[in-house]
Amino acid sequence: MFFEQVLQQIINGLMLGSIYISVAVAFTLAIGILNFLNFTIPALYMFAGMVGWSLSHYGLPFGLSGPIKWWFALFIGINCAILASLLVERFTYRYFKMKHGDATEHAIPLVSSLGFLLIFEYLILIAHGSDTRGFSTPFTNLDWRVAGFIISIPQLISLILSILIVAALSYLLIRTKVGRALRAIAENPDAATLMGIDVDRIVPVVFILIGFLCGVSASIFAINYHEVSPYMGDHVGTKAIAAMVIGGLGSVWGAIAGGLIVGLSETLSIYFFGASSAQITVWSLLLLLVVFKPTGLFGHNAIGKGKF
Amino acid sequence: MSGYLSGVLAILGINVIFAYSIYITAATGQLNLGGAGFQAIGAYACAILSNELGLPIYLTLIFSAILGGAISFLIAFPVLRTKGVYMVLATFAIAEIVAGIILNSDFLGGPTGMIVNNYIETEVVLVVAIIVVFLGFYIMSTRIGLAMRAVHDDEAVADLMGVNKRAIQVSAFTIGGSIAGLSGGLYALYFGFIEAQYFNANISIFVLLYVLIGGTQTAWGPLLGASFFTLIPEALRIGDDWRFFIFGVIIVAMMILRPEGIVTRDALDRVWSKLFSRKSNV
C-alpha cells in the first residue's frame, strides 16, 4: 500500500512538473542565448492566462463581441503574451549593450524586466482585481485508471505536448538557419555581428519563443486546473527558476529534467513532511546546486560567467 | 505629529535602513535579492527575545542586528563562491528557505504570524535610520569604503592592487545582513505583528530596486531611492495598484535614460562645484 501511494505521488509529481517545463525552457532560453535573467516570464505566463480568461468571460473589449470560445480565447491569450514579450525586448534587451563603467551595469536588463513584471502584474490587477477566476473547459474529471493508479488525461497530454514543444525547439536550434544564428549569438554577440548576423533582427525570435512558451504553459494550466489568477505566475515562476538551475542554465533538455525533478521533490516532500515543506526542499536543492555545482545537471560552463 | 505623518515617516525610516543593508552589499558589486530573508531573521529574533525573555527594546534591536550579521557571515562563505546571476539566484533561494522554515516552525508561529509585546515610537525608528545613514556615509569614506568601490568598479584590478577582495566582500555582506536584521527588528517593534508572508520575494525585489534606481556609486543612492519610492506615492495619493504600475514604468524609463541610478559621482561633483566654488566659474 505504502509503495503504491508513493508511486501515485511520483506520477502526480511528474504531472505537476509538466507545467513547469515550458516556463523553465523559457527562462533557460533567455539566459542561455542572451545571458539575460528575464523576470518578466512569470508575468507573461499570468498575462496569457488572464487575457484568455477575460476573453472567454467578457468577450472582446469595448463590447465588440460576446464571450469567446475557450480554445480561441486561449489562442488569443498566447498571441498577446508574444506581443507583450516583444514589447519587453524593445525596452530591455536593446539597452543591454549600454556601458557606463559600472560593475552593476550587467543588471540593467534584469532590473528593467523586474519593472515590466510590476507593470504587467498590476495592469491585470487594476483591470480584473485579485480574485482567482474559474476557467471552464469541457474537460473535467477525465481520469485514466491504470492498475489502480490515477492519471489525469489532460495532464498526460500536457506532459507529452511540453516534451514535443521542447523537441521542436531543439530541432529549431540545431538544424535551422535561425537556430544557428541564435547559437552564434549565444557564443559571442560581437563575433556573430562580424559574421553577418543581424543581431537586432534575430534576437526578437527568442522573445517570440519565450512569449509562446509562457502562453502555452498558462493555457495548459488553465485547462488542467480550471482556474486562473493574477498571482498564478509567482508560484510557477519561482519553481521554473529552480527547475532551470537544476537542469543547468542554458540547457533546453536540462529544463525538462529540472521541471520533472522539481515537481517530484515538491509532491514527495508534501507527502512525507507536510504541505509547506516543499518550499524548503526545492530551494535548498537549488542553493546547494548553485553553490557547489552551478552548471546544474546538463549546463554549459560558460553561461552566466561572461558579462554577468 | 499626526498619526498619518508618523506612520509614513516610520515606514520611510525602515525602508531607508533596509536599503542601506542592500546597498552595502551592492557597493561591492554583489546583488543581494534575498533581503527579505535577512529582515525576517531580525524581525523574528526581536519578537522572540522580547516575548520570551522580556529583554528591553535596545537590547532586542542589538541582538537582531547581531543575529542578522552572524547568519549572513556564515552564509557569505558559500554564497560568495558564486557570481553575478548565480549570486542573485543563491540569495533569492536563501530568502525562500528562511520563509519556508518560519512557515514550518510552530515555535515561530508558522503561517499565523506572531504578536510582539514591545512597542517603539516613530522617533526611535527615525533616530536609528539617521544613525544608519551616517554609518553608511562613514563606511564609504574610510579605506574599507575605498576598497569596496574598487572591487565594485573592477574586481580583477582591485585584486591586483592588493585589495583583499574576499575579505571586503564577506565583510560587506555581513554588515549588510546585520543592518537588514536591524530593520527587521524595527519593523517588528513598530508594527507589533509579524508574519512570514510579509517577508516575500516582492519585498526583496523592491528594496534592490530602491538601491539600483538610487544609484550604487555613492552613499546618497539608497537614501534617495528609498525616500523617492516611499514618499512620491504618498504625495500623489494614488491607489496601491496604480502605485506599483507607475513604479514599474519609472524603473523601465530609468534603465533606458539613466541606468547608473539617480545619483552618480559625476553628478555629485558637478553639484558640489556649483555650490562651493562660484569664483572659479568667473
Image (cartoon, grey):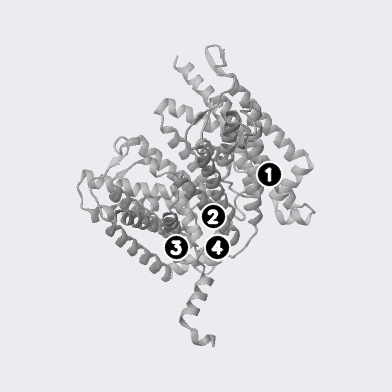
Q: Which residue is mark 3?
A: B224
- Labels 3 and 4 within one chain: yes
- Labels 1 and 3 within one chain: no
| Whole-percent x, y for residue B131 in the image | 33, 64
Visible in this render: residue A254? no
A210 is higher (above) or lower (below) than B177: above
Q: Earlier in the sequence, mark 3 or mark 4?
A: 3
Q: Check whether the beta carbons of the residues at disc 1 and disc 3 lie within 8 A of each other.
A: no
Task: Describe the element under mark 2 as helix, strand or loop.
Answer: helix
Alpha carbon separation for disc pair 3 and 2 = 14 Å
Q: Which residue is mark 4?
A: B260
Q: Check whether the beta carbons of the residues at disc 1 and disc 2 lie within 8 A of each other.
A: no
Q: Check whether the beta carbons of the residues at disc 4 and disc 2 lie within 8 A of each other.
A: no
Q: Nearer the viewer, mark 1 or mark 2?
A: 2
Q: Earlier in the sequence, mark 3 or mark 2?
A: 3
- Read off the chain for label 2: B
Task: Describe the element under mark 4 as helix, strand or loop.
Answer: loop
Alpha carbon separation for disc pair 1 and 2 = 23 Å
| Numbered circle sitting on residue B251 | 2
* Residue drawn at (51%, 50%) of the image: B88
Q: Residue furthest top?
A: A147
Q: Which residue is mark 1?
A: A206
Q: Is residue A127 left or right of residue B77?
A: right
Dividing the image into 4 quarters, which one contains the C terminus of chain B?
bottom right
Q: Amino acid at mark 2?
A: Ile
